Image: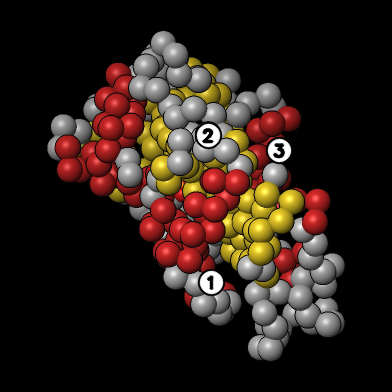
Amino acid sequence: NIVFLNGQFMPISEAKISPMDRGFLFGDGIYEVVPSYKGKLVGFGLHIQRMQDGMNAIGIKLNKSVDDWRDIAQSLIEQNGKGNLGLYFHVSRGADIKRFHAYPDDIEATVFAYAFEIPEATVADKTLVKQFKVASTQDLRWKRCQIKSTSLLGNVMHFQQGHDAGVHETILYNQHNELTEASACNVFIVKNEVVITPPLDNQLLPGITRHMLLDILRKDGTLQVEERVISMNEVRAADELWITSSSKDIAPVVELDGKPVGNGKVGDIWQLAQTLYSANKH
Ligand code: PDD
């Protein structure tokens, strides 16, 4: 497994960072996960833009263009076999000589990237697709969820809650009983053939899959699409429930908190949406 660290490619066993790295001490960093199918990157420009937005939000300065990142991605793909890979990019603020909360202004960011195998792209077939089960709980993370921060303990604890309950994901709602997202996915519901997802704000990550799916559905025009606040009552009464992420595309959820979603089967609107997504994602 060949990885990229601070300008060089090397075997993972040779990749070393300082324990004084603020990514390690404070979770002070930004990351991305970009899928690549048989050498073809999906949503690359959007992913890099989001990573840049995150670095701007937390004041990490790094001189890398989209093309620089693309070169790193392509090298990793070549050196790790051209199968289906997730590309992980990580920029932490860097290593300081002391542990002090304020941002130091004279250190260099740590840049790490590696590739890991991901499953085949999702096939838009109701009979073949993996059926997801989820639990729900109040979102107890922080109020800056639009930043794709490497401080993931809040997400990890919510994911673990679902894992302990024997389900695949945990969907989250705020103190007003409004849906936000899931611990590592965005969430959509379908009601009366309308596809609905929460609007972007500080309560959720602006998912690239979410963005591309909305774009593709609007361009196609067959389905009505809404970005608006969704109550948990609406989620529980939905005909279909989906979770989306770069590694899952659109994953159909058939069970929420032990109860069937809609008729408890993968829905027709999912089949249509995933068909359009598979054909048009880029
Ligand atoms: N997770 N919301 C959260 C909290 C996420 O961590 C993710 C992605 C998403 C979906 O975003 P996108 O469609 O851009 O992948 C939503 C990644 C894959 C991860 O942490 O591994």
- Taking the spot 83% from the left edge, 82% from the top edge, the residue there is 97
Name the quadrant containing residue 196.
Answer: top left
Tell me the crowding category of disc 3: few under 14, some 14 to 19, or many 20 or more residues within 10 angstroms, Cα based. some
Query: Counting residues from the N terminus, which is met first, the one under dot 2 or under dot 3?
Result: 2
- Of all residues, the one furthest to the left in this rendering is 221
> What is the distance, in whole Å, between disc 2 and disc 1 at their CAs?
30 Å
Query: Which element carries disc 1, helix, strand or loop?
Result: helix
Residue 174 % position (x, y): 52, 50
Tell me the crowding category of disc 2: few under 14, some 14 to 19, or many 20 or more residues within 10 angstroms, Cα based. some
Amino acid residing under circle 3: Gln
Query: Counting residues from the N terminus, which is met first, the one under dot 3 or under dot 1?
Result: 1
Judging by the rendered image, the residue that carries numbered circle 1 is: 55
Q: Given this view, does label 2 or label 3 mark the residue nearer the observer?
A: 2
Tell me the crowding category of disc 1: few under 14, some 14 to 19, or many 20 or more residues within 10 angstroms, Cα based. many
Judging by the rendered image, the residue that carries numbered circle 3 is: 160
> What is the distance, in whole Å, between disc 2 and disc 3 at their CAs?
29 Å
Residue 266 % position (x, y): 40, 17
- Of all residues, the one furthest to the top in this rendering is 127
Judging by the rendered image, the residue that carries numbered circle 2 is: 83
